[in-house]
Each structure stands twice: as structure tokens, then as C-alpha cells.
Image (cartoon, grey):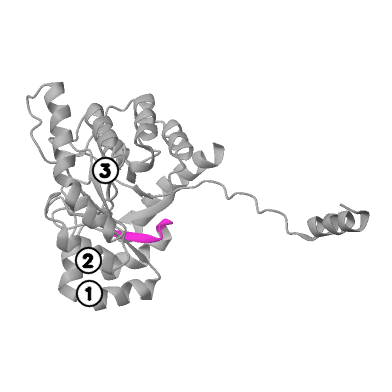
Amino acid sequence: MNRRRFLQSLSAIAAAPAFAAESPWKLNYMLASSMYGSLPLAEILPEVKKTGATAIELWPKKHGTQREEMDAMGHDKFAALLKEHGVGFGGSTRYDLGPFKLTEEIAIVKKFGGSFIVTGGSGEWKGVSSEQLKANVKDFVEKMKPHAALAAENGVEIGIENHINNLIDTPDSLLWLADDIRNTPGIGIALAPYHLPQDTKLLADLIKHIDQKMTLFYTWEHGMGCMKPMPKEEELQQMPGRGKLDWKPLLQALKETKFTGPTEIFMHPTPRGIPIMPTAAETTAEIVRAKNHLDAIVASL
């Protein structure tokens, strides 16, 4: 290279814009409509952005009524409401349909630009041996393959939530499910720490094992539970920053796996179908409090 060309090369390098620094990792918040109980969409949608979320996920009865309301008002009107409030559509929770009857729901989620449907597992789990449970998880995944393929074709992922009284309940069943779906598009895991032992190492290790098969993550801890009436301050211990769970190892694991999917700040009130706080404004404020707690931890990582 002659001297002139060498100097031209140096000039070009000096003139080139510096590479942008990599954006810091952060949580991508999604709002579950059930946090507002059975309040109408007209009251909930104005709250979405206030919570720090960019999109909403709709729940049906008994936890909410917004999924039914969407159909009742008509899809065009719902789309107009989303546009009016500048809110995206994430997806829906459909335990009522189960994992094998999601064909119509997949089409609807796609129609609104959503990316996921949460549901439960299916198969025998009560009283079976560990070896049989592992085989049942594998059998469930085989049965799900055509449904997962349909979801993937439509840009949707079916998130199987770990849930009590369900095939996917224990840490082992989650590990097996993650392994069995590793190379199957259209199906993933919606991880709910609430339903697992509140052991931060176990939970962080599960997150890392699930890795890229995480469809959705609930920042939801067990606290005092959600199966019976109790004073509100006890019920709210399901929320980050109010219960005893140290979220730092879990968030560190999410960061290590570079999880950018939806994260929902979540809890269940008793009875189901009521907002987590008496009013929409108070519900929003409680979600924001939890978000601030999580964001402070993320900033410290």
C-alpha cells in the first residue's frame, strides 16, 4: 500500500461513525389484563403505558373478562382502541381452551400482531413415578408438535406454564419439557416462579436451562399464597419487593440468557376477577412500584 492510499485509509477510519455502544439489557414489560380484574378495556388500556408496558395480554373469565369483551365489541373496534391508546397486543392466556384447541386463537393472536398464547400441559401426573412422568412429558410434546407447527407458521409461540395440579408442575418436569422442545419451533415455557420452591439458585438455574425457550416470564413470587382471603398487605407479598424472594439471581440469569421476551409483573387476588387493588389507579401504582424495584436491581447487575 503506497503512502497516499495509507493516509486515505486513516482518514476514512477517522471519518467513520463510532460503533454505537450496545444498549443495556432491560426487561420488556407486558401487562396482564387480569391484574385489573373484570374492569372494562376502556379503563385498562389507558393504564398500559403508565405501568411501563408496551402491550397488553388478555385474560378470560374467571381471572378477567377482557378476552370475552374483545369478541363482544368486535375485532375492528378493539383494534381501534389499541391504536387510540398506542398499545400493542401481546397475546392471551387460554387455560380454558387447553393446549390442543388453539387453532382459532392462533389466528386471532396473529390478526392483532400478538406473539404468544399461554396455556397448561396435559397428561397424567398424579401418583406416577419419575420415569413415567418424564415419559408423559415427552408424549405431551409429541402430541403438541402439529399445534406448535401451526403456531410457528403464524408467528405465534404457545407458552406452557408450570402450574400446580398439572403435568408441568415440578422443577424436573420443566427441565424435561425444555429439553424435549429445544428444537421444536412454536412452543416454549411461560415460567411462573410462584408455583415453584422459592429457592433462588434453583429458579436461576431453571431460567438458564430453559434459555431461548422462554416464551414469557412472570415476576411473581409465592409470598403468602393466593388461595384464600387474607389482609391485602399479605396478599401483595406475591409482588416483587413485597415478599421475601431475592430477585437479583433470577434477573441475572435472564440477563445471561439475553431474554428479551415479555415479562409480566403478576399476582392473583382472592377472589379471582377483582383488581389487585381497589381502583385502576391504585392497581397501576402498585405495578409501577414493583417495576421500580425490579428496574433498580437490573441497573445494579
**Type of amino acid under label 3:** Lys
The residue to which callout 2 is attached is: 108
Q: Which mark is residue 75?
A: 1
Residue 259 falls in image quadrant: top left
Q: Quadrant of the C terminus?
A: top right
Residue 79 image point, x, y percent: 29, 74
Q: Nearer the viewer, mark 1 or mark 3?
A: 1
Q: Which residues are magenta?
A: 51-57
Q: Earlier in the sequence, mark 1 or mark 3?
A: 1
Spatial CA span between label 1 and label 3: 36 Å
Instruction: Please state the horizontal and vertical placement of residue 124, each as a whole percent of the image.
Output: 7, 33
Q: Is residue 226 above or below residue 74?
A: above
Tag 1 and tag 3, C-beta contact below 8 Å: no
Residue 232 has which mark?
Answer: 3
For residue 12: magenta? no
Give me the disc on residue 258. none
Q: Amino acid at mark 1?
A: His
Q: Is the residue marked by circle 1 packed among few (<14), some (14-19), or many (20+) residues within 10 Å? A: some
Eye-nearest disc, 2 or 3: 2
**Which one is nearer the viewer's eye here, 56 or 160?**
160
Separation (CA) of disc 1 from disc 2: 9 Å
Mark 1 near mark 2, Cβ–Cβ under 8 Å? yes
Against 85, residue 294 (above or below) is above
Q: Position of residue 32 (x, y in %)?
A: 29, 54
Amino acid type, callout 2: Ile
